[in-house]
Image: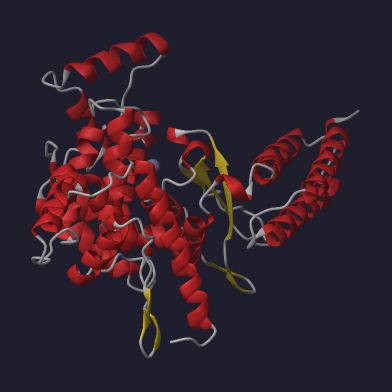
Amino acid sequence: MSAKDFLLDELYNVDLTLQETLRHDYAPGSGREYFDECKTRIQRLTDETNRVDPGDSTAIAAIASRLSEIVSQPISLIERSHLGEFSWPFAHQLREIATPLCTESGPKGALTPIIHILADGGLGAYRIYTETPLPDPIRHRRILNVVFPRTMKHHVLLHSIFGHEIGHAAWAIPALRSALRTSVIEPLFKESRLETPAEAEKWIQDPARPPEITKYLSDWAIRHTHPFTFLGPNNWAHYSWQQEFFCDLFGVVTFGPSFAGAHKTLLGGIDPSGLMITTSHPPHAARAPLIARAVDSIRCLKFSASGSAQLDAAIAKFKSFVDQMPSTNSNAQIDAAIAGAMTTLAKFPSVLYQALDIQQLRRVCELLARRIPPVGAQLKADGLDLSPLDFRHILACGWIVWLGHDELKLAKPLKFLDVNRLCDRGILHRQAVELERERGGT
Ligand SMILES: [Zn+2]
């Protein structure tokens, strides 16, 4: 069997595997589109393989690699999507934010992304597979696979970390990335230790660095044949660190305070010292102050008095949770980067976090404290008031009730899971209210 024949055989196998995925039920929304996109990709790659010269080993290797990356892997992810394993109201909200942001132009008009949701793994599972654009002459639709942690089905407060992952998805869209580079990355890192690979190298080689970083570098030296460096072939590490900081900032401007709560809880849990570094991710100790200052800069945790001293104390508790960190960035850099992000994202109205009114906050917190899932709709003497309630506001209130539960002096204590479940249900109700509004309700 020649390499070309083997590749054609594998294309046939992949097609059979795709057919097998039809046995299962998936979340409503994108199953058909996902299937069609994979089917088209198999067809294009088969046509390309049929045309290839059997002696052209470079072309055959390139097609084999693309087959695995752009078809086999996405197919393997389809069957891992089970409706009962993640919060689908939250997944719906993510789709609403990511779709306009990640729509690209193609030869025949706008190409909306196909957003697929699955549950996998635990604490570190949060991610969005974004796909790199293909150099195909016929443009394909981008598939975004959103991964929720299987073990935290109802933990919508933690799911706010998707604000960061949507930042990665935005970064994957070339037209958006260049605008974000100019408007966010440049002002954020101007004259900082991460402005250039050379500056970053100077910083990490500084003898005054924390001992944990010295240990990390000596461990690295044992495991690798080349030293850790931001220079030369490893300068993608610098690019990757910049992207991580950008995504954190993106999380704040899109999800507001609940993003800060999720980030601090998840990263503070995985790396309590805050000093763990990798070539792809900067230390939490450097990311946390950026988030705290960004929260300050957009004033999303600044409220006038609510009329309830207990609730004001609960809000202050949340604020101090976000603030308990060392600092490395200057406010001016962060303000400029946020202004750039706001300008660039202004054309996507559903993406940016909007200020939460203190009386709305009070009403939602009171409902949560009484174990009632919060919802914008209210029954009134003269009918039904279908007011919209942004899901990110529900999440912000969830964090306030959770972190401030001592201050709120709840008659019956709530566990973290309870608050999450109530918010999850509130987001579900919100979707029902939206559907009713679309049907012509008021
Ligand atoms: Zn990231």
Residue at the top extreme of this rendering: 222
Residue at 21% from the left image edge and 33% from the top image edge: 285
Q: Nearer the viewer, residue 58 or 241?
A: 241
Relative height, residue 111 to residue 406 (above, below): below
Q: Nearer the viewer, residue 259 or 336?
A: 259
Residue at the bottom extreme of this rendering: 382
Tell me the quarter of the image containing the N terminus.
top right
Tell me the quarter of the image containing the C terminus.
bottom left
Residue at 36% from the left image edge and 70% from the top image edge: 389
Image-based side of 269 in relation to 316, left or right: right
Residue at 11% from the left image edge and 52% from the top image edge: 313
Horizontal and vertical percent position of residue 350: 39, 70
Question: Is residue 433 something that shows in the picture?
Answer: yes
Horizontal and vertical percent position of residue 271: 29, 27
Q: Nearer the viewer, residue 217 or 22?
A: 22
Relative height, residue 305 to residue 324 (above, below): below
Relative height, residue 416 to residue 255 (above, below): above
Q: Quadrant of ligand 1?
A: top left
Image-based side of 6 in relation to 253, left or right: right
